[in-house]
Image (cartoon, rainbow, N blue to C red):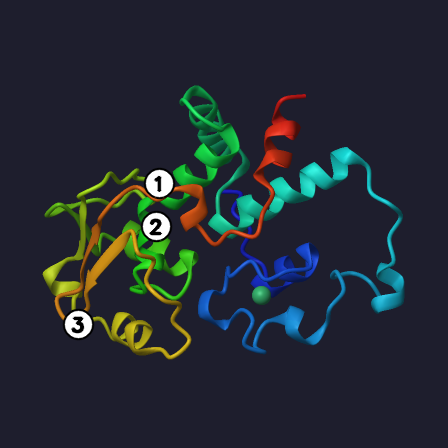
Protein backbone atom coordinates (compact mmCIF):
# COMPACT_ATOMS: atom_id res chain seq x y z
CA UNK A 1 0.00 0.00 0.00
CA UNK A 2 1.13 3.51 -0.73
CA UNK A 3 0.52 4.84 2.73
CA UNK A 4 3.12 7.35 3.92
CA UNK A 5 5.12 5.76 6.72
CA UNK A 6 7.87 8.32 7.18
CA UNK A 7 8.28 10.70 10.09
CA UNK A 8 4.93 12.23 10.92
CA UNK A 9 6.43 15.50 12.09
CA UNK A 10 7.78 16.16 8.60
CA UNK A 11 4.19 16.36 7.42
CA UNK A 12 3.43 19.01 10.04
CA UNK A 13 6.46 20.96 8.87
CA UNK A 14 5.42 20.62 5.22
CA UNK A 15 2.02 22.14 5.93
CA UNK A 16 3.29 24.67 8.47
CA UNK A 17 0.75 23.56 11.05
CA UNK A 18 0.20 20.61 13.32
CA UNK A 19 -1.71 17.81 11.63
CA UNK A 20 -2.00 15.72 14.79
CA UNK A 21 -0.86 12.63 12.94
CA UNK A 22 1.23 11.88 16.02
CA UNK A 23 -1.85 12.61 18.02
CA UNK A 24 -1.37 13.96 21.49
CA UNK A 25 2.31 14.78 20.85
CA UNK A 26 1.52 17.50 18.33
CA UNK A 27 1.76 21.00 19.69
CA UNK A 28 3.33 19.97 22.97
CA UNK A 29 6.94 20.57 21.97
CA UNK A 30 7.49 16.99 20.86
CA UNK A 31 6.71 17.45 17.19
CA UNK A 32 9.33 18.45 14.60
CA UNK A 33 7.40 21.61 13.78
CA UNK A 34 7.80 22.82 17.36
CA UNK A 35 11.56 22.87 16.81
CA UNK A 36 11.93 23.79 13.17
CA UNK A 37 9.31 26.05 11.72
CA UNK A 38 10.16 25.67 8.05
CA UNK A 39 9.39 22.95 5.53
CA UNK A 40 11.57 19.81 5.40
CA UNK A 41 14.34 19.77 2.82
CA UNK A 42 15.26 23.43 3.30
CA UNK A 43 18.51 24.52 4.87
CA UNK A 44 16.78 26.86 7.25
CA UNK A 45 14.06 29.44 7.54
CA UNK A 46 15.69 31.62 4.84
CA UNK A 47 15.67 28.77 2.31
CA UNK A 48 11.96 28.33 2.83
CA UNK A 49 10.97 31.76 1.60
CA UNK A 50 8.73 30.82 -1.24
CA UNK A 51 7.35 32.48 -4.30
CA UNK A 52 3.69 33.43 -4.21
CA UNK A 53 1.79 30.23 -4.81
CA UNK A 54 -0.68 29.74 -7.65
CA UNK A 55 -4.34 29.07 -6.87
CA UNK A 56 -3.77 25.49 -7.87
CA UNK A 57 -0.83 25.12 -5.52
CA UNK A 58 -2.84 26.54 -2.62
CA UNK A 59 -5.78 24.22 -3.33
CA UNK A 60 -3.48 21.24 -3.67
CA UNK A 61 -1.74 21.93 -0.36
CA UNK A 62 -5.10 22.22 1.39
CA UNK A 63 -6.24 18.90 -0.03
CA UNK A 64 -2.97 17.18 0.91
CA UNK A 65 -3.21 18.59 4.41
CA UNK A 66 -6.74 17.33 5.07
CA UNK A 67 -5.97 14.00 3.45
CA UNK A 68 -2.95 13.55 5.70
CA UNK A 69 -4.71 14.66 8.87
CA UNK A 70 -7.24 11.86 8.42
CA UNK A 71 -4.63 9.46 7.01
CA UNK A 72 -6.38 8.65 3.76
CA UNK A 73 -4.88 7.74 0.42
CA UNK A 74 -5.76 9.71 -2.68
CA UNK A 75 -8.20 7.16 -4.04
CA UNK A 76 -10.11 6.82 -0.77
CA UNK A 77 -10.16 10.59 -0.38
CA UNK A 78 -11.39 11.10 -3.90
CA UNK A 79 -14.14 8.51 -3.40
CA UNK A 80 -15.25 10.21 -0.22
CA UNK A 81 -15.34 13.50 -2.09
CA UNK A 82 -17.64 11.90 -4.67
CA UNK A 83 -19.91 10.78 -1.87
CA UNK A 84 -19.87 14.27 -0.31
CA UNK A 85 -20.72 15.88 -3.66
CA UNK A 86 -23.66 13.52 -4.17
CA UNK A 87 -25.26 14.53 -0.88
CA UNK A 88 -27.55 17.49 -0.28
CA UNK A 89 -25.92 20.57 1.22
CA UNK A 90 -22.46 22.08 0.98
CA UNK A 91 -19.99 19.64 -0.52
CA UNK A 92 -17.00 20.86 1.49
CA UNK A 93 -18.88 20.56 4.77
CA UNK A 94 -20.21 17.15 3.77
CA UNK A 95 -16.66 16.02 3.08
CA UNK A 96 -15.39 17.07 6.50
CA UNK A 97 -18.36 15.41 8.24
CA UNK A 98 -17.84 12.22 6.23
CA UNK A 99 -14.19 12.16 7.33
CA UNK A 100 -15.17 12.80 10.92
CA UNK A 101 -17.66 9.95 11.26
CA UNK A 102 -15.27 7.30 10.03
CA UNK A 103 -14.79 4.62 12.65
CA UNK A 104 -11.04 5.23 13.01
CA UNK A 105 -11.57 8.93 13.61
CA UNK A 106 -14.26 8.30 16.22
CA UNK A 107 -11.98 5.86 18.08
CA UNK A 108 -9.41 8.67 18.13
CA UNK A 109 -11.91 11.33 19.22
CA UNK A 110 -13.11 9.09 22.02
CA UNK A 111 -9.54 9.12 23.33
CA UNK A 112 -9.13 5.35 23.07
CA UNK A 113 -6.24 5.99 20.66
CA UNK A 114 -3.72 8.82 20.78
CA UNK A 115 -3.71 9.35 17.01
CA UNK A 116 -5.77 8.35 14.02
CA UNK A 117 -2.92 6.11 12.94
CA UNK A 118 -3.13 4.23 16.21
CA UNK A 119 -6.92 4.16 16.02
CA UNK A 120 -6.71 2.60 12.58
CA UNK A 121 -4.53 -0.16 14.02
CA UNK A 122 -6.95 -0.84 16.85
CA UNK A 123 -9.74 -1.19 14.30
CA UNK A 124 -7.84 -3.25 11.72
CA UNK A 125 -6.51 -5.60 14.39
CA UNK A 126 -10.07 -6.41 15.38
CA UNK A 127 -10.22 -4.73 18.78
CA UNK A 128 -13.29 -2.64 18.02
CA UNK A 129 -16.99 -3.46 18.11
CA UNK A 130 -19.80 -1.45 16.56
CA UNK A 131 -23.17 -2.23 18.11
CA UNK A 132 -21.71 -5.45 19.48
CA UNK A 133 -20.21 -6.77 16.24
CA UNK A 134 -16.56 -6.70 15.29
CA UNK A 135 -15.81 -4.14 12.58
CA UNK A 136 -12.24 -4.11 11.28
CA UNK A 137 -12.80 -1.58 8.50
CA UNK A 138 -11.33 1.80 9.46
CA UNK A 139 -13.46 3.68 6.95
CA UNK A 140 -16.71 2.28 8.36
CA UNK A 141 -19.26 5.12 8.40
CA UNK A 142 -21.01 5.53 11.74
CA UNK A 143 -24.55 6.82 12.31
CA UNK A 144 -26.29 8.56 15.18
CA UNK A 145 -26.95 6.10 17.99
CA UNK A 146 -24.11 3.71 17.13
CA UNK A 147 -22.18 2.20 20.00
CA UNK A 148 -18.41 1.92 19.63
CA UNK A 149 -16.73 -0.39 22.13
CA UNK A 150 -13.66 -2.53 22.61
CA UNK A 151 -13.70 -6.32 22.51
CA UNK A 152 -13.78 -7.80 25.97
CA UNK A 153 -10.23 -9.10 25.57
CA UNK A 154 -9.09 -5.62 24.52
CA UNK A 155 -10.68 -3.60 27.29
CA UNK A 156 -7.63 -3.79 29.51
CA UNK A 157 -5.08 -2.88 26.86
CA UNK A 158 -2.38 -0.82 28.55
CA UNK A 159 -2.18 1.46 25.56
CA UNK A 160 -5.85 2.37 25.85
CA UNK A 161 -5.59 2.98 29.58
CA UNK A 162 -2.58 5.23 29.03
CA UNK A 163 -4.44 7.19 26.35
CA UNK A 164 -7.51 7.71 28.51
CA UNK A 165 -5.35 8.85 31.42
CA UNK A 166 -3.12 11.11 29.35
CA UNK A 167 -3.24 14.73 30.42
CA UNK A 168 -2.69 15.64 26.76
CA UNK A 169 -5.96 14.04 25.76
CA UNK A 170 -8.24 16.53 24.02
CA UNK A 171 -11.75 17.05 25.45
CA UNK A 172 -14.52 14.74 24.26
CA UNK A 173 -16.60 16.39 21.51
CA UNK A 174 -20.21 16.90 22.60
CA UNK A 175 -21.59 14.69 19.81
CA UNK A 176 -19.88 11.71 21.45
CA UNK A 177 -20.36 10.06 24.84
CA UNK A 178 -17.95 7.74 26.60
CA UNK A 179 -18.14 5.38 29.53
CA UNK A 180 -14.44 5.36 30.35
CA UNK A 181 -14.55 2.43 32.70
CA UNK A 182 -16.39 0.16 30.31
CA UNK A 183 -14.57 1.58 27.26
CA UNK A 184 -17.90 2.11 25.54
CA UNK A 185 -18.57 5.14 23.39
CA UNK A 186 -21.67 6.34 21.62
CA UNK A 187 -22.37 8.60 18.67
CA UNK A 188 -25.06 10.89 20.09
CA UNK A 189 -25.56 12.64 16.78
CA UNK A 190 -23.78 13.12 13.48
CA UNK A 191 -21.58 16.21 13.90
CA UNK A 192 -22.00 19.36 11.88
CA UNK A 193 -19.03 21.17 10.32
CA UNK A 194 -19.02 23.65 13.18
CA UNK A 195 -18.47 20.82 15.68
CA UNK A 196 -15.27 19.74 13.99
CA UNK A 197 -12.00 21.43 14.99
CA UNK A 198 -10.31 21.07 11.61
CA UNK A 199 -8.10 24.00 10.60
CA UNK A 200 -8.92 23.81 6.90
CA UNK A 201 -10.67 25.69 4.14
CA UNK A 202 -12.42 22.76 2.53
CA UNK A 203 -13.86 25.01 -0.18
CA UNK A 204 -10.39 25.00 -1.72
CA UNK A 205 -10.58 21.23 -2.04
CA UNK A 206 -13.95 21.51 -3.76
CA UNK A 207 -12.40 24.01 -6.19
CA UNK A 208 -9.49 21.68 -6.86
CA UNK A 209 -11.67 18.69 -7.66
CA UNK A 210 -14.11 20.78 -9.69
CA UNK A 211 -11.54 21.82 -12.28
ZN1 LIG B 1 2.85 18.29 14.69
Q: Where is residue 128 in the image (x, y as percent from the top left)?
A: 21, 53
Residue that sits furthest to the front in the current view: 194
Q: What is the CA distance from the residue labelled 3 to the residue labelled 2?
A: 19 Å
Tag 1–tag 2 contact (CB < 8 Å): yes
Could you tell me which residue is drawn at 65 percent across and 73 percent down? Answer: 34
Mark 1 within 8 Å of ligand 1, using the beta carbon: no
**197 vs 11, nearest the viewer:** 197
Rendered position, 175 above or below 77: below
Q: Which of marks 3 and 2 is nearer the N terminus?
A: 2
Residue linked to disc 2: 104
Could you tell me which residue is drawn at 42 percent across and 62 percent down? Answer: 115
Residue linked to disc 3: 156
Q: Can residue 45 be seen in this view?
A: yes
Mark 3 within 8 Å of ligand 1, using the beta carbon: no
Helix, strand or loop status at disc 2 = helix
Residue linked to disc 1: 139
Q: Which of marks 3 and 2 is in front?
A: 2
Callout 1: 10 Å neighbours few (<14), some, many (20+)? some
Relative side of 25 to 52, left or right: left
Could you tell me which residue is drawn at 45 percent across and 46 percent down? Answer: 194
**74 vs 180, nearest the viewer:** 180
Tag 3–tag 1 contact (CB < 8 Å): no
Q: Where is residue 62 in the image (x, y as percent from the top left)?
A: 64, 43
Helix, strand or loop status at disc 1 = loop
Relative side of 8 to 115, left or right: right
Locate the C terminus and report the quarter of the image it occupies.
top right
Amino acid sequence: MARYTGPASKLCRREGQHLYIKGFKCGTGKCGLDRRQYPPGHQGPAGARRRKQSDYAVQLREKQKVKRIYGLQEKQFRNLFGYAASRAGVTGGNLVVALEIRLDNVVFRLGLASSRRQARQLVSHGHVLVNGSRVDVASYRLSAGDEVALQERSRDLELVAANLESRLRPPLPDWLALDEKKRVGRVLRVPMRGDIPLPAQEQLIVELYSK
